[in-house]
Amino acid sequence: MNKIVLSIIGLGLIAGCTVADDLEQRTTESAAVAKEFMMTLKGELQTAMQEGGPVNAIQVCNTRAPSIAADFSEKKGWTVARTSLKYRNPDNAPDAWERQVLEQFEERKAKGEDPKQLSYTEVIENGGVKSYRFMKAIPTGAVCLACHGEKIDATVESKIQELYPEDQARGYSEGDIRGAFTITQPM
Ligand code: HEC
């Protein structure tokens, strides 16, 4: 009897650990993808800025960012994207869950947390279907200000205006949370 009970407890513990391991692995992999996304984009952005200034670099964000996101999504079988409370591209608008997390990031930053370290994960159940969701804050750096800062060069401004007539992604300062990477993994 006792042996059976112990085995059941044992199996339960193993199952519990496996679930925790699985979530930990999902988080590790999501963080790695977010990091690679950031590095790729920053690299291409810096090269384009050096070659032709911010006007030239707009196309990196305009076409490369969505295509890098699409490549990761396809490779992993996840949804990988960027979002923000004040977005430039309406395609990047947050859904209700993402909005809550972005607001939570702002609160945590206001309480002193480092924006570079802000991330959040949750298992969401929607209509009986579970998915794992991950978000990681994207801080505003000095390079970002040419296109997201207070003072934007007139040529850059008019190009942005032409591509994104409803742009809200301006007026940021260094250290602000510009937005976040957002990943959804099916479970
Ligand atoms: C050369 C101009 C330029 C620079 C520099 C730039 N961005 Fe952007 N950013 C854009 C454009 C254009 C978009 C819209 C991309 C799209 O259509 O998805 C954008 C979109 C974004 C988004 C997605 C949310 C949204 O607003 O639509 C984030 C997050 C973001 N940028 C962060 C940054 C960060 C962080 C930096 C600095 C490391 C940076 N950007 C530098 C032009 C720029």
Image: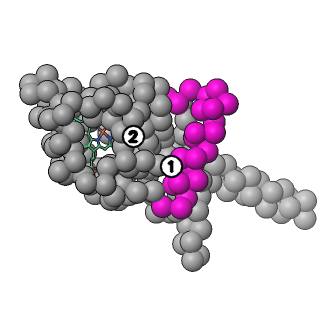
- Prevailing secondary structure of the magenta residues: helix
Q: Earlier in the sequence, mark 1 or mark 2?
A: 2
Eyeballing the image, is 127 above or below 93? below
What is the total number of numbered labels drawn onto the structure image? Answer: 2
> Are dots 1 and 2 in contact, CB under 8 Å?
yes
* Residue 124 percent across, percent down from the top left: 58, 62
Q: Residue at x 35, y 31 (%)?
A: 149
Circle 2 is placed at which residue position?
Answer: 34
The amino acid beneath tag 2 is: Ala
Residue at (50, 49) in percent of width and height: 134
- Marks 1 and 2, how far apart at CA: 10 Å
Q: Which residues are magenta?
A: 95-116
Look at the image and tell me whether residue 106 can be seen: yes
Q: Residue furthest left?
A: 51
**Identity of the residue drawn at 14% across and 35% down:** 155
On screen, 165 above or below 169? below
Q: Position of residue 118 (x, y in %)?
A: 55, 35
Magenta stretch encompasses residue 109: yes
In the image shown, does 35 or 166 lie closer to the viewer? Answer: 166
Disc 1 residue type (three-letter): Phe
Where disc 2 sits, the SS reads helix
Asked whether mark 2 lies closer than 8 Å to ligand 1, one says no
Q: Which mark is residue 48?
A: none
How far across and down, in percent of the image, does residue 147 sit? 27, 34
Q: Which residue in the protein does label 1 denote?
A: 134
Determine the image quadrant of residue 144.
top left
